[in-house]
């Protein structure tokens, strides 16, 4: 550790750390005191607003692996671990095992979708970590050898997170229906989309369990929407900005429901990196951006929609009975080719959990020592 002293100012302390002096605000330091967290509930039991004024250090020193602070106007002495200070000085935020970079994928790279048998997901934390990690990194994975009983899908979902309902209830069945409430429930082609953008918080992670598929046609289509959005950023930055900066209306409307929500087609984080996409022509409401803005917005979204059909991005494969495809509904765009309705049977059962639950499950596994990293070559999906 540096021999440089700790400097105390009116508002905070500059602390010598491995990479030099790092400044920390006193309120932040007081909140970072381990005594603020209850050992049993693990929740915060200190309220910085309960102090008579803003906290201020009387003295500070480094003892062992902690920064020790004596506070003015308080008897509390805080011992803040130096590794916490190092983390915030270098990363700017807490360590997060689920903060894994997205691995963009393209059709011509023969995407290596992770495949894990259902029994392994349910019984083996290594396999569960591998699956949840793949869903964070690739946004898609396949669970094979699904049991055929009626509880098979809920057992799988609950290994990852609670089932989140939609207007359809906890589960939906994708098969031909006589009076369909959704184009998915016909034999027609289903354009590339993300599910239910008309909901305020569209479903996070989608499960599609193939129960039977003996029809002619009906290939499943998937692409990495984040990869398409990044390509648009490269090839037409103005179009990218229009789709990332403006919200457009979506709906889901039938006799007993009338959902409406505004979404950005391309979602970015504060650093401008793509975090997701939302697209669905069959659930897109009448545009209500200013008409003059539509002169440039429509060409931008049309360009993006055309890119969703390009062979460089699209993966086509046949859903096999006994498999369950799981994908991030805010990133992976999916669709289906049309099929001959009377050529056989096609039945997929679906449901959702949310992305927060997925990451929570992965974090818990990672803390237990199961990080899901896998060097072995994953099986390829035939294109
Ligand atoms: Fe869908």
Image (cartoon, rainbow, N blue to C red):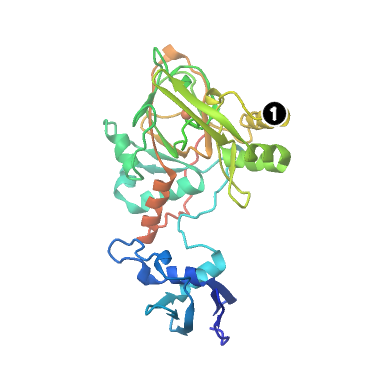
Residue 41 visible to the viewer: yes
What is the x, y in percent for residue 143?
39, 39
The residue to which callout 1 is attached is: 294
Is label 1 in a helix, a strand or a loop? helix
Among the 4 quarters of the image, the one containing residue 368: bottom left
Can you name the residue that lies furthest to the front here?
Answer: 52
Among the 4 quarters of the image, the one containing residue 277: top right
Side of 117 relative to 328 (left or right): left
Residue sitting at x 51%, y 45%: 138
What is the x, y in percent for residue 216?
47, 18
Label 1, residues with CA under 10 Å away: few <14, some 14-19, many ≥20: some
Side of 14 relative to 55 (left or right): right
Residue sitting at x 33%, y 42%: 162
Instruction: In the rendered view, tell whether residue 211 sits above or below residue 36.
Output: above
Instruction: In the rendered view, tell whether residue 68 sits above or below residue 224.
Output: below
Residue sitting at x 49%, y 20%: 217
């Amino acid at each position: 550790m540096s021999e440089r002293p700790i400097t105390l100012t009116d508002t905070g302390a500059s602390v010598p750390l491995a990479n030099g002096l790092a400044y920390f605000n006193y309120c932040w330091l007081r909140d970072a005191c381990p005594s603020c967290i209850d050992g049993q509930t693990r929740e915060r039991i200190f309220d910085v607003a309960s102090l008579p004024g803003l906290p201020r250090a009387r003295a500070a020193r480094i003892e062992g692996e902690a920064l020790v602070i004596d506070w003015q106007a308080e008897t509390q002495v805080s011992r803040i671990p130096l590794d916490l200070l190092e983390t915030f000085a270098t990363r700017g935020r807490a360590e997060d095992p689920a903060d894994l970079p997205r691995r963009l994928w393209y059709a011509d790279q023969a995407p290596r979708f992770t495949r894990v048998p259902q029994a392994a997901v349910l019984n083996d934390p290594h396999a569960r970590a591998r699956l949840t990690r793949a869903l964070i990194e690739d946004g898609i994975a396949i669970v094979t050898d699904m049991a055929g009983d009626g509880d098979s899908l809920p057992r799988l979902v609950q290994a990852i997170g609670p089932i989140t309902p939609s207007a359809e209830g906890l589960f939906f069945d994708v098969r031909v229906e006589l009076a369909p409430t959704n184009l998915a429930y016909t034999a027609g082609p289903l354009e590339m989309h993300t599910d239910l953008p008309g909901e305020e918080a569209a479903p996070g992670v989608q499960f599609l369990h193939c129960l039977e598929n003996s029809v002619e046609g009906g290939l499943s289509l998937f692409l990495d929407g984040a990869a398409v959005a990044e390509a648009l950023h490269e090839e037409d930055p103005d179009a990218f900005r229009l789709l990332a900066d403006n919200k457009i209306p979506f709906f889901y409307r039938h006799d007993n429901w009338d959902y409406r929500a505004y979404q950005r087609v391309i979602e970015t984080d504060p650093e401008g990196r793509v975090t997701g996409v939302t697209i669905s022509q069959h659930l897109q409401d009448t545009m209500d951006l200013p008409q003059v803005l539509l002169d440039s917005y429509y060409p931008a979204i049309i360009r993006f929609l055309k890119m969703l059909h390009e062979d460089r991005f699209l993966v086509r494969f046949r859903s096999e009975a006994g498999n369950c495809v799981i994908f991030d509904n805010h990133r992976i765009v999916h669709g289906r080719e049309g099929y001959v309705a009377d050529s056989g049977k096609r039945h997929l059962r679906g449901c959702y959990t949310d992305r927060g639950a997925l990451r929570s499950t992965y974090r818990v596994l990672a803390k237990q020592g199961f990080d899901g990293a896998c060097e072995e070559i994953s099986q390829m999906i035939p294109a």
